[in-house]
């Protein structure tokens, strides 16, 4: 294991040359990497949370074409947003994007703030996401981790560790950061991490924070998605009508309806449910 104190300028330079060397040969191309538009980058970062890039590529341009800027997204109905979002999963992100757009319009004059602290005041944005947005949209030298960056650092600097904590990795991320071009550096780190997963047993298994994703089939997340798809397709359905359209026990439908209403996805008008 190499600690922060062991990272001499020569070691930092060698690491950067290795990462950039791979990036020049095997770097990936994505539409959100060819723009510096803060709104587009925000959308891509929210979409990329817990979703593979292949699926995001399919939806990103459709979403941008439907809602090209903060004003259009802030004005859009949640029903229209969810209609475009279908197939992405984790629908909380779609609701978060609408709430973020509204906050940007009312609090920040329609302009996405560039500082991590200001970005963290937006709905559903934590420090890591705020730092990533600040780096990619504004080229600021922030420090953060995501799964591919974590994989790269565990592979190179924690050969003997099997419960590596993020708190141990972050100082190394900061020490090796290319502050002159953090946007490109983080793209390169991520692409290197993707390569590692293909040719090595996933180094992230040695992270203290590693968790296998819970099965989607039969989960409440699946049921929530089914309910929302049904209500996007058909306005104003009663509880019994929703149950009749889903092959799910009434109790589970009822429990997820309550949760969706509590979270602001749906509302009940009389005995009928609609997208909020």
Image: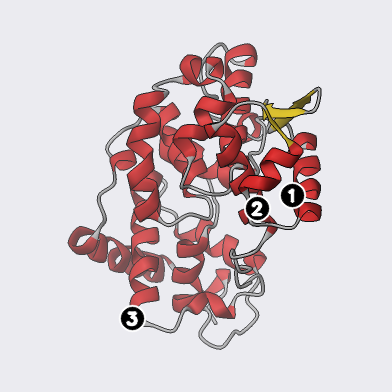
Nearer the observer: mark 3 or 1; the answer is 1
In the displayed structure, 96 sits above or below 202; it is above
Do labels 1 and 2 touch, CB within 8 Å? yes
Say few, some or many: other residues with alpha carbon within 10 Å of mark 1 (under 14 / 14 to 19 / 20 or more): many
Do labels 2 and 3 touch, CB within 8 Å? no
Q: Residue at x 51, y 66 (%)?
A: 150
The residue where tag 1 is placed is 253
Q: Is residue 219 visible?
A: yes
Say few, some or many: other residues with alpha carbon within 10 Å of mark 2 (under 14 / 14 to 19 / 20 or more): many
Helix, strand or loop status at disc 1: helix
User: In x, y percent, where is residue 229?
Assistant: 55, 41
* Numbered badge on residue 223: 2
In the displayed structure, 209 sits above or below 266; it is below
What is the distance, in whole Å, between disc 3 and disc 1 at their CAs? 42 Å
Q: Is residue 176 left or right of residue 90?
A: left
The residue where tag 3 is placed is 199
* Numbered badge on residue 7: none
Q: Is residue 246 left or right of residue 180?
A: right
Q: Earlier in the sequence, mark 1 or mark 2?
A: 2
Helix, strand or loop status at disc 2: helix
Work out whether residue 131 or residue 214 is closer to the camera in this orientation and state it. Answer: 214
Q: Earlier in the sequence, mark 2 or mark 3?
A: 3
User: In x, y percent, where is residue 129?
Assistant: 57, 44
Q: Residue at x 33, y 46 (%)?
A: 57
What is the distance, in whole Å, between disc 1 and disc 2 at their CAs? 7 Å
Nearer the observer: mark 2 or 3; the answer is 2
Say few, some or many: other residues with alpha carbon within 10 Å of mark 3 (under 14 / 14 to 19 / 20 or more): few
């Amino acid at each position: 294991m190499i600690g922060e104190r062991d990272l001499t300028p020569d070691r930092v330079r060698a690491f950067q040359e290795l990462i950039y060397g791979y990036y020049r040969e095997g770097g990936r191309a994505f539409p959100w990497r060819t723009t510096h538009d803060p709104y587009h980058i925000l959308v891509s970062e929210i979409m990329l949370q817990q979703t593979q890039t292949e699926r995001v590529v399919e939806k990103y341009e459709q979403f941008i074409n439907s809602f090209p800027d903060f004003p259009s997204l802030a004005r859009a109905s949640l029903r229209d947003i969810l209609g475009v979002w279908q197939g992405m999963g984790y629908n909380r992100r779609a609701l978060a994007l609408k709430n973020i757009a509204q906050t940007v319009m009312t609090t920040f004059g329609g302009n996405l703030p560039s500082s991590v602290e200001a970005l963290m005041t937006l709905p559903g944005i934590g420090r890591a996401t705020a730092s990533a947005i600040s780096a990619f949209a504004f080229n600021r030298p922030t420090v953060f981790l995501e799964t591919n960056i974590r994989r790269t650092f565990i592979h190179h600097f924690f050969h003997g560790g099997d419960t590596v904590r993020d708190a141990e990795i972050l100082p190394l991320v900061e020490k090796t950061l290319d502050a002159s071009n953090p946007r490109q550096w983080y793209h390169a780190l991520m692409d290197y991490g993707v390569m590692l997963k293909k040719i090595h047993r996933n180094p992230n298994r040695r992270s203290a924070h590693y968790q296998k994703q819970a099965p989607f089939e039969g989960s409440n997340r699946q049921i929530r998605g089914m309910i929302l798809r049904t209500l996007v397709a058909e306005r104003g359905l009663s509880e019994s009508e929703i149950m009749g359209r889903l092959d799910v026990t009434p109790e589970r439908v009822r429990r997820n309806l309550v949760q969706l209403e509590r979270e602001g996805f749906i509302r009940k008008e009389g005995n009928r449910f609609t997208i909020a």
